[in-house]
Amino acid sequence: MKSTCYVFVQDMTPVGFIFAICAFATCGGYHGHLQIKVDCAARIQNNLSINIDFGYPFRLQQVHFRAPLCEAMREEVVFLNGDFSAAAQFFVTVGVLAFLYSLLATVVYVFYQNKYLKNNRGPLVDFLVTVIFSLTWLLSSCSWAKSLNDIKTATNPTEMLLLIAACREKGNRCAATQEPSWSRLNTSAVFGFVNVVLWSGNIWFVFKETGWYKTGQRYPSRTSSRKRSSEMHERLYSESSFDQPDENFGPFRQESFTESRGDFDKQVQRQASINQSQVSFSLPETYLGKTGFYERENKIVSQGPVIFVNEM
């Protein structure tokens, strides 16, 4: 269940291969039909129908049909103009390869997720392939959209009538009774650009699994660190504001606080005076006087500098 959620949340590959199938299937399986009716003025041949069939890979220069000649009981072979196989085959090839890679990636995500994330090789390869498919989808979709417009122009009934000699003669009447449907090919071009959006958006999801994104997350920029430090300072300032005494306690609370503080100071002074009275000795004060004799009990003790000791 965890791996399945990983596939559908972290990656849009399962959705990508569905749209890839829709893209190349609507283009590769196309078959167009055009029918033209010819009425000759000489009434030699009337209500002649010409059926023109074409389809993938849209090599129109190889598509031919037989058109009647109203002058006699003869027919001519007419070929269409244009070769649009390169763009069509490129579009279908990209769709098939994208489908196969999406299917393979889905299997790897579901059953081999640990090996995929090991050594960061799987995400890097997946990232490069996704970028390549995004570019190829863009190129193939643009080229196919341009070729589709040219195919519509080449198979336009007005252009087809100009290719038939009987329709270029005056007096003969030609009209297209059935035109090809372009809704399927238009859908294929839309699916192509949808795949461009899907694979381009998938680049971000695959990039998040690479080591490049994780390295950037591990070492944030200076701006982010400065923001974090400023937030920490704000938090500390807000917490220190709670430790400060409130000034709105009222006059009674303020006076009681000052009185208790005065009593505490008096107790400290009393304790200091008691400690001084209990001291039995203190450091003597000395004074160096002139050289002379110091007598004690009428006896000479020493001769030299006089030292006066002030005892407490």
Image (cartoon, rainbow, N blue to C red):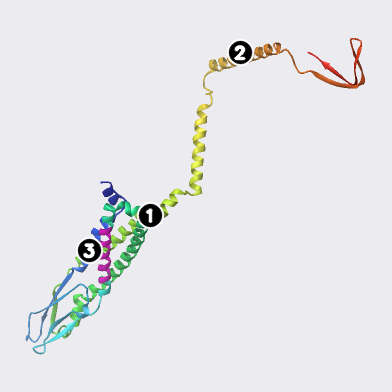
Query: Which residue is disc 2 drawn over?
Result: 263
**Image quarter for residue 309?**
top right
Q: Label 2 near label 3: C-beta < 8 Å? A: no
* Residue 119 numbered mark, or none: 1
Query: Disc 2 versus disc 1: distance between alpha carbons?
Result: 73 Å
Q: In the image shown, does 155 or 87 lie closer to the viewer? A: 87
Q: Position of residue 41 (x, y in %)?
A: 10, 85
For residue 229, side relative to residue 178 (left or right): right
> Which quadrant does the C terminus fall into?
top right
Q: Going by the picture, which residue comes out furthest to the bottom? A: 72
Q: Which amino acid type is shown beneath numbered disc 1?
A: Asn
Decide: few, some or many residues near mark 1? Use Cα within 10 Å; few <14, some 14-19, many ≥20.
few
Q: Earlier in the sequence, mark 1 or mark 3?
A: 1
Q: Which amino acid type is shown beneath numbered disc 3?
A: Thr
SS at mark 1? Answer: helix
Q: Label 1 near label 2: C-beta < 8 Å? A: no
Query: Which residue is disc 3 drawn over?
Result: 187
Q: Earlier in the sequence, mark 3 or mark 2?
A: 3
Residue at point 16% right, 71% down?
A: 31
What segment carries the magenta color? 88-104
- Tally of marks: 3
Q: Where 234 sits versus 122, above or below?
A: above
Q: Where 184 sits versus 213, above or below?
A: below
Residue at point 50% right, 45% down?
A: 225
Q: Earlier in the sequence, mark 2 or mark 1?
A: 1
Q: In the image shown, does 210 or 14 lie closer to the viewer? A: 210
* Residue 311 numbered mark, or none: none
Q: Position of residue 176 (x, y in %)?
A: 14, 75
For residue 39, side relative to residue 138 (left or right): left
Nearest to the eye among marks 1 and 3: give it: 1
Q: Which amino acid type is shown beneath numbered disc 2?
A: Asp
